[in-house]
Image (spheres, grey):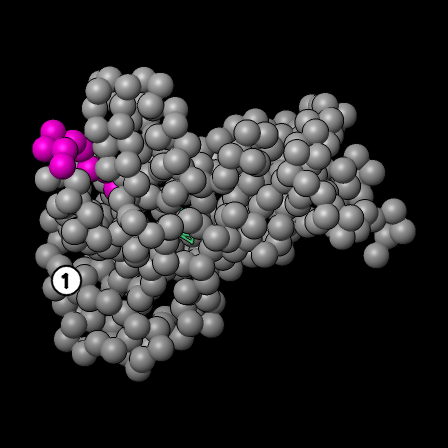
Amino acid sequence: MNISTINFDSFQKLKDDDCQERIIKAKKTLGKDLLILGHHYQNEAVYRHADFAGDSLKLAQHVQNVEAKYIVFLGVHFMAEVSDILSRDNQITILPDLSAGCSMADMANLAKVERTYREISKVLDFDEKITPVTYINSAADLKAFCGEHQGIVCTSTNAPKILNWAFKQKEKALFFPDQNLGRWTGYKMGIPLDKMPVWDPDLPLGGLTEKQIIESKILLWKGHCAVHQMFRVESIKDFKKNYPNGNVISHPEAPFEVCKNSDLVGSTEFILRTIEKADPGSEWLVGTELNLVNRLAKEMKAEGKLVKFMSHVICECSTMARIDPQHLAWTLESLIKENPVNIIKVPQKEADLARLTLDKMLEVS
Ligand code: 13P
Ligand code: SF4
């Protein structure tokens, strides 16, 4: 460890208010050398410091135009990896807490995806028949896998366009790691549910028969978001009973039946913009992460709109929540000492392959 590295221990004991002051001061000192990017699920205590906020697509698009030397990412690991891949070589991406991962992204890994490739290849020629499509919520080595196999990345915003592109290349798609986004997108494109079987990477042949694989249009990886999995159709029914003119809007990571019973389905950015543009007096039930919904409910109350959270239990992205004011203050003050901590650096070969698929995604969207 470098002698001037600042230890996190002293920050852990700081009160939130003290951190807030130190963050503001550090931002002033770093000036144009720093840009803080934030995902909509971050809680208010750090979100307020973001210079630019967005959904995964908007953040990926924005990072390419950033001039700052340091990009501090208020989000989860895969988002910081995308930032590192899409930013210039002389820029540094920092994730304030390295344990801020995405539990859904962790449901697929390279060993399992490569085994899947070998298993499917027993039944058909994978590279001839299948476009691998990875949700951006995945590790960089899975994006690199897609780069090696003429595949592509998608986000919740562009999934329909990306799947359309995928089907122009090959007959079928392998969609990982979120089965819900894959199923909902395929369903909206008119693909019958039985043509989208779930591939369980822990079972021989994914737990499917050869016939199912041959007849499939999309093989859906057995993965999901633990946060969005909590939403229930019953909550929608209750809301509609109490607010007959109310609207229901959900993220496509929510279970299929929830999406089917929602009036609108889309990314976090879509949810925010739709409700912001809605008429005063309108009522909304929102099926996505709690921090976003709480912030929106507060902002929209001032405009006479009612925004309610879809669940009675707390559905917070606990990994996003690891980015707290203590970690943010620590990483910023380390930058002032010119001793960055928590740098996210994707190995070059992997980054080059992953960049292929990300560039393709940005082009198609
Ligand atoms: P968005 O791209 O819609 O922001 O989704 C990212 C995410 O992780 C949702 O759980
Ligand atoms: Fe991952 Fe779910 Fe958190 Fe989104 S809400 S970052 S999918 S764990």
Q: Which residues are magenta?
A: 242-250
Q: Quadrant of residue 261?
A: top left
Task: Locate residue 99 relative to residue 199 in the image: left or right.
Answer: right
Taking the magenta stretch, the answer to whether it contains residue 154 is no
Q: Quadrant of residue 240?
A: top left
Instruction: State whether residue 93 appears in this view.
Output: no
Q: What percent of the width, then of the height, locates residue 123?
A: 25, 76
Q: Residue at x 42, y 65 (%)?
A: 108
* Element under disc 1: helix
Q: Which residue is mark 1?
A: 195
Taking the magenta stretch, the answer to whether it contains residue 244 is yes
Q: What percent of the width, then of the height, locates residue 191?
A: 13, 53
Task: Locate residue 145 relative to residue 83 in the image: left or right.
Answer: left
For the N terminus, the quadrant is bottom right
Q: What percent of the width, then of the height, locates residue 53?
A: 48, 31
Q: Residue at x 25, y 72 (%)?
A: 124
